Amino acid sequence: MKRNWCILALLLVPVAWAQEVPYDQVQDHVYATIDGQDFYMDIFTPKAKDPALPGHGLAIVDVASGAWHADRGKIEDHKKAQFYDIFTKHGYTVFAVRPGTRGMYTALEMVGHVKTAIRYIKAHAADYGIDPKRLGLTGPSAGGHLATLVALTPEPGDPSASDPLLQQSTDVQAAGIFFPPTDFLNWNGNTNVAARLGDLYFKGGVNGHTPEEIEARAKEISPRYQVKGKTPPFLIFHGDADPMVPLQQSEVLVAALKEQGNEVTFTVVPGGAHPWPTIDQEVAKMADWFDAKLRTKS
């Protein structure tokens, strides 16, 4: 009998652990159907409905993309980094958006998908109990690249549009980013990025396109070249030992933002790779930063 109780206790441990998460999760919610293809987001709703929490009634859009791939594994990676635990403990509703995958979609198409997700979230803000005028945006690596481009290229809504989504703008109030690619013309001294990432530029790659077309598209998908005037405030974390996205990629974006007089907080993590084992500490700092930036309407 004693042995049976021990076995039962062991069996119950995973169940008890699973119940400790501070959120309710909806998986694979369709936010758009484009050319017959469904696009998905997971929605993390905080269990604590405490109006005293700084993120209560607010939302963060998380771009779940790694190496410009958007399978469910990317959401699991963000879980391991404590994105959803930390943000929902602050009271935020988190929308983990999957924007499509490289090879099927170009960078600009994936940016368009994230913008569609933002329009969808704003159009359904009342359903989720959030303020559509106070959205935060985040993403690491490729997701950080797409999130940064979205934040820097806002599109207005059209109040007269028949599609309720198109009535919504794509602007966000603050962007917290981890180790983003930002310059496809100069990758830490490598000026031939298109040879490796050409399918982000054009469907099928860069073959058949002129050098002028390639350079123009490289600039179009490089956040550092899309800093044009006033932007939302940025918080950027990057490790100085990143073997995949050089620190230089964040440095040039930060310089471009500052040159235009924009607010940017840049933290270099000593020894930080891609990512680093204690990244949850930086996620916690980002949550505090979002608390300050999203607390009041812009």
Image (tube, helix red, strand yellow):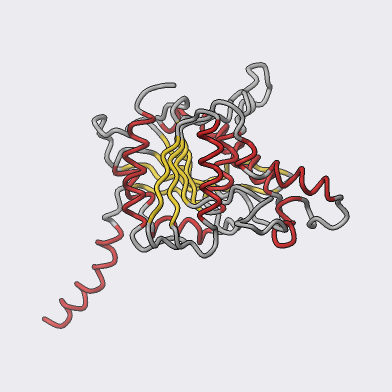
Question: Measuring 60% from the left and 57% from the top, which residue is drawn there?
Answer: 188
Q: Is residue 264 left or right of residue 20?
A: right
Q: Compared with residue 17, is residue 130 higher up or lower down, i.e. above or below?
A: above
Question: Measuring 70% from the left and 56% from the top, which residue is drawn there?
Answer: 191
Q: Is residue 102 visible?
A: yes
Image coords of residue 197 (percent x, y)? 70, 58
Name which quarter of the figure residue 94 lies in. top left
Q: Compared with residue 135, is residue 193 higher up or lower down, i.e. above or below?
A: below
Q: Is residue 18 left or right of residue 211?
A: left
User: Which quadrant is the N terminus positioned in?
Assistant: bottom left
Image coords of residue 96 (percent x, y)? 48, 47
Q: Compared with residue 47, is residue 297 higher up or lower down, i.e. above or below?
A: above
Name which quarter of the figure residue 271 lies in. bottom left
Image coords of residue 280 (percent x, y)? 34, 54
User: Which residue is the extreme one toward the left?
Assistant: 2
Image coords of residue 177 (percent x, y)? 47, 45
Q: Is residue 147 left or right of residue 25?
A: right
User: Which residue is the extreme one toward the top?
Assistant: 160
Question: Measuring 54% from the left and 26% from the top, which residue is drawn there?
Answer: 230
